[in-house]
Image: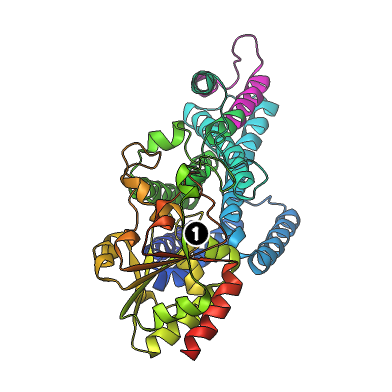
Amino acid sequence: MNGTTWVELAYLVSAVLFVTGLKRMQSPATARRGNQLAGIAMLVAVAVTLADPIHPTLDFTSILIGIAIGGVLGAVLARTVKMTAMPELVGFFNGMGGAASSALAAAEFVRAAGTGTRLDVVSAGAIALSMVVGAVTFSGSLVAFGKLAGRISGNPITFPAQKVVSALIALVIVAMGVALTLDSTAGLAGLEPTALFWLFTGLALLLGVLLVIPIGGADMPVVISLLNSYSGLAASAAGFVVGNRILILSGALVGAAGLFLTVLMCKAMNRTLANVIFGAFGGDAASGGKSGRDTDPVRTVDEEGAALLLAYASRVVIVPGYGLAVAQAQHDLKKVTDQLVQRGVDVRYAIHPVAGRMPGHMNVLLAEADVPYDVLYDLDEINDDFGQTDVVLVVGANDVVNPEARNPQSVIAGMPILDVDRAKNVIVMKRSLSPGFAGIANPLFHLEHTYMLFGDAANSMRTLSREVGEV
């Protein structure tokens, strides 16, 4: 077996592992194993690429140092980052993927420019595409990271003629990319090729910022999915730059999976992708937008009263939200669930597709507390059952249970919600009556059969667990 044959076979094994891993990620029950398979696939791909005899002049010292630094940082982040910070970490990782693809494209262009080599159309086009998509992903992901981490306002940031400015910048980028593709040694409008390339890169970075700043907190799950897709496309284009087939394949898989997930998120929010990208919707929890409903009376309940309602119910549905992640109360919630099940109560979890700040946020959170997968139900599976549910326990969720979505005049009009207001009783665990990411009040809190359990979810859940056990 010659050198080329074993490399191709190893790449084939890596590709199969990538596809199998991605397939397993479609279910929470197999997602962990799928992630492990994908990691093994990448390890095989990297090892084979480094051992490939067509790369005899690699600087293995620098490569190993880079791998060591990246491995240590990855291990530290995996162990120390809290679940509440996972969405912004994913956004940051997306940005780093885009930055890596852009750096590779820039290195290839600078190398060719330094030797005066004219790149062929395919190579030049791949470099231009990798650079623009990678740069947009990098800067856009940093903005998303800032919004999710609270370092940038979660409200839409807009200015006059913003869409026009973004469109003009995009057109200029396309013109520059075409010029660089057709002749990498020729300039444009008096600019030398290298200067043109760096201006092209700078505009792509600016475009990434302009595309994300007008997007509010309510759309962040969609943005994270979309940027993940961008990072995959940038990696695939980088694969064409260096002629590496496994990079092309893995990048294409990530890009396709991210785009598919984005479409699903848009469907879950009853939005179009164009509306998310070019619209300005949603704000953070600190934003305004409260209506007069916030001054209406509410019925409150303490942990003892909530425990009685839950313990003597026949059917209970739990709706987790971002507040559960903030309080890290999933383990105490699992204790409450176990106690109710021991009493013969039918307990299920209703998971909204965009609950939390990234796709699958609630599934991962509940898996951390060993909540069985067979009691997790998607919106479409459980929505018709709320009318026959005795008690719904809403923990830190807001917009995904807001009946205002049925109001044609609301900013979340048409967004599919969990119909918890149709249950016989609703208990809402929340710190206050503040609005959710969409920045609007929730009339659910003021219904006659809704009981507000105010306080920190972690403390309230611990007390609730103790009270349920004593009933």
Instruction: Give how far across and how far down residue 244 sits, in percent.
Output: 51, 48
SS category of the residue bearing label 1:
helix
Image vertical order of residue 415 relative to residue 46, above or below: above
Image vertical order of residue 159 relative to residue 248, above or below: above
Residue drawn 61% across and 55% down?
Answer: 89
In this rendered view, identify the residue nearer to me: 344 or 198. 344
Instruction: Give how far across and how far down residue 8 sits, in percent.
Output: 45, 58
Q: Is residue 243 left or right of residue 188?
A: left
Q: Is residue 87 left or right of residue 26?
A: right
Instruction: Give how far across and how far down residue 396 sits, in percent.
Output: 50, 62
Q: Which residues are magenta?
A: 177-205
Image vertical order of residue 163 relative to residue 150, above or below: above
Image vertical order of residue 329 relative to residue 11, above or below: below
In this rendered view, identify the residue nearer to me: 317 or 369. 317
Number of numbered discs: 1
Q: Is residue 458 left or right of residue 397?
A: right
The stretch drawn in magenta includes residue 198: yes
The stretch drawn in magenta includes residue 251: no
Name the residue that disc number 1 marks.
7
Instruction: Specify the amino acid type for callout 1.
Output: Val
